[in-house]
Amino acid sequence: MKLAIVVYILREQALDLARKLAVWLDERNIDYVFESKSAEKLRISRSAPIEELNMLCDAFISLGGDGTLLYTSHFAMSKPVIGINAGYLGFLTEFTQDEMFPAIEKLLNGTHSIHNRSQLEARVPGNGELKHFRALNDVVIEKGAYSRIPTFVISLDGQLLSAYRADGIIIATSTGSTAYSMSAGGPIIAPKSSVFVITPICPHMLTVRPVVISDDKIIEVSVGAPDGEFPLNCDGHLMKMLTPQEVVTVRKSSETINLVANENRNYFEILRTKLLWGREHNFGL
């Protein structure tokens, strides 16, 4: 088995972890290759552009936070991805640094478990072609630098849901429900739930609330405004600047992301740990 390694190069903790990992792999004669920017920072010769890693390798290791794992997952396609948390919150990166080597050993031995996570696919017509973007967490359309409050027109399977005046719209998977959507007041959804959530960002009316829909729905979104450009982001990356009335079609992708599961933890334990649920506080009373 050949491993692809992607590192968050702006965090020294992740770089130190990568150095330890390279030594560990060399000692066991395990084949690996680093993503090019990671290899350059670490001064390691085994490297390849991230776009080529899927063809060269059998599995991926992400060293960083959730952002690094999201970035890695876009290039891993159907290959297994181990997320090692060298960041802060870490909802997706289930393994701690101390758990890294046992997790890799399970992967190499074929005794690992996989979480299959659904993705979103956003389609936007332009210049005579249909552009496709994928997102594990969310597809977000925002007002950007537009000075007024635009209207976001949303349809489900060709039927009008509503026209929201808001700063933006988040369409999130169950995996992404604990990311931007949660920050904007959306619900927490267990990862294997076959649903999406549509969450308005700072809606103009207090009666506007997030809507949970089945993941077989086809969502169409356009921005009602006389002028301006509106950012379309997938997993936090700018994909396109939309013009008024340009329609974005969002649906469930046919491709899933295969995250290596930490069998010693479950989703609700992660919630309790990361969100400090049930934690006792001593206020000196």
Image (cartoon, grey):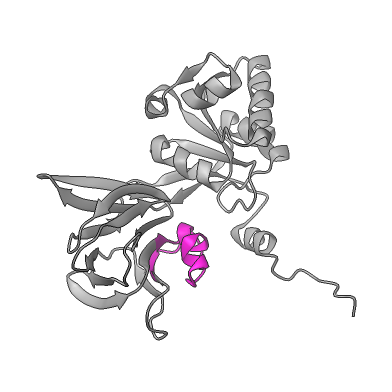
Above or below: residue 229 compared with residue 116? below
- The residue positioned 42% from the left and 36% from the top of the image is 76
Q: Quadrant of residue 211?
A: bottom left
Question: Residue 3's x, y, as percent?
Answer: 52, 25
Task: Name which quarter of the figure residue 48 lies in.
Answer: top left
Query: Would you say residue 207 sits in the magenta stretch?
Result: no
194 in the magenta segment? yes
Q: In this view, does 63 lie to the left or right of 74?
A: right
Quarter containing the C terminus: bottom right
Judge from the rendering whether residue 127 lies leftward or rightward of residue 2; answer left or right: left
Residue sitting farthest toward the bottom: 207
Q: In which quarter of the image is residue 218?
A: bottom left
User: Does residue 105 show up?
Assistant: yes
Q: Is residue 70 above or below residue 162?
A: above
Q: What stretch is highlighted in magenta?
A: 172-199
- In this picture, residue 258 sits left or right of residue 240: right
Quick one: which residue is furthest to the left in this view?
A: 128
What residue appears at the point 46 percent right and 27 percent down from the top-left corner?
Answer: 58
Q: Position of residue 266 (x, y in %)?
A: 62, 56
Res. 259 visible in picture? no
